[in-house]
Amino acid sequence: MDVDRFIALNDPVWQRTAELARRAGRRRDLSGAEIDELLLRYQDVTLHLSQARTTYRDPALIRRLSTVVAASHAAVHGARVARLATLRRFLGSTFPAAVWTCRRQLVWATALFWGTGIVLALVFWRAPDRLDLVIPESYQDIYAEEDFVDYYSENPSVVFFSRVTTNNLQVSVLAYGLGALAVIPGALILFENGAALGVVAGLFLQRDEFWSVFVVYVLPHGLLELTAITVAGAAGLRVGWTLFAPGDRSRPEALGDEGRRSVTIVLGTALAFLAAGLIEGFVTGSPALPAALKITVGVVAWLAYLAWILGRGRRAVAEGWTGALEELRPTWAPIDPLAPPTGPARPVEVPAALAGGATESAY
């Protein structure tokens, strides 16, 4: 039997097993008949996994069956809390999938934050007289020559790290919370923070110190830090927009789904802020490190973060991850994106055309 025939013959069994395991993982009661069915299907899929490994050796099929078997095992035998496994699942699949699910809102958040900063920086660079309306002319030299650089070195690294990390978390929670409130307040927060960044960048562009000062002291930590703020803001915008456009779900159901996913994103961005705070506290203001090394550290950290949330996020969603908090339960099984929607519980039927010519049992 070739692999396509094997999948077609047994796919209903796998879908049904995953459905029962998923319901058990969400603490939904199973009837006595369903429990007996889960026990039977668990044995079936375990046999199919063995066949897939020894006969077909298809990585995608093995990964799918391994997930269903693991979820069924946890549902049948009881799941122990595996903190390390839960952390790996969160970092490797749940968080990046949650961010990828918010990719459209991420585009809007990026435009509001980064777009505003870039546009205003260019405006103040090409029209220096307008900068006086935002920063008093008498303070511009003091800020650029003293306050800006001293900010990164006037406190011990540990104290500075703690302070900036706390501040970044507060900004991200504010951007998320106001976005979730009704979209517009969150959009204004992103716009205001982007405008503040644009004003400072415009000042250093005007003074011809953009590359020698601004980039050296902002880019190492700023790329990662500001991207994480953008992601948190996007999560808030998605929740807020659900108030107006819940789609084919009821509004309470939609808000519940997006709220659980957004919590995942906020938790994940906290890790990004921790990394950005370490860079800002121990790399950005360090007089012992050359500027090129500081910039390299910042760019590498930023690219790694993008690969994590976008590259891995896209693959995780393709594998069936949704980014919801319930995915961290040991009994959760990803929904197969290629499988047809599952309806009410029904007996598993083998297609007659396949059953008639099959040389192996489905069980």
Image (cartoon, rainbow, N blue to C red):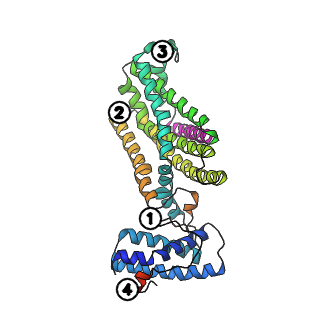
**Mostly what secondary structure, the magenta segment?**
helix
- Amino acid type for the residue under numbered disc 3: Arg
Q: Secondary structure at mark 3?
A: helix
Marked residue nearer the N-terminal end (1 or 3): 3
Viewer-nearest of labels 4 and 1?
4
* Tag shown at residue 357: 4
What range of the chain is rendered magenta?
153-179
- Amino acid type for the residue under numbered disc 2: Ala
Viewer-nearest of labels 1 and 3?
1
Left or right, 15 with reference to 177: left
Q: Secondary structure at mark 4?
A: helix
**Residue position marked by numbered label 1 in the rendering:** 338
The percent coordinates of residue 188 (x first, y second) are 57, 32
- Amino acid type for the residue under numbered disc 4: Gly
- Answer few, some or many: residues within 10 Å of disc 4's Cα (few below 14, many 20 plus, some between 14 and 19): few
Residue 152 drawn above or below residue 314: above
Marked residue nearer the N-terminal end (3 or 4): 3
**Residue position marked by numbered label 2 in the rendering:** 291
| Magenta-drawn stretch contains 178 | yes
Viewer-nearest of labels 1 and 2?
1
Q: CA distance from mark 3 to mark 4?
A: 80 Å
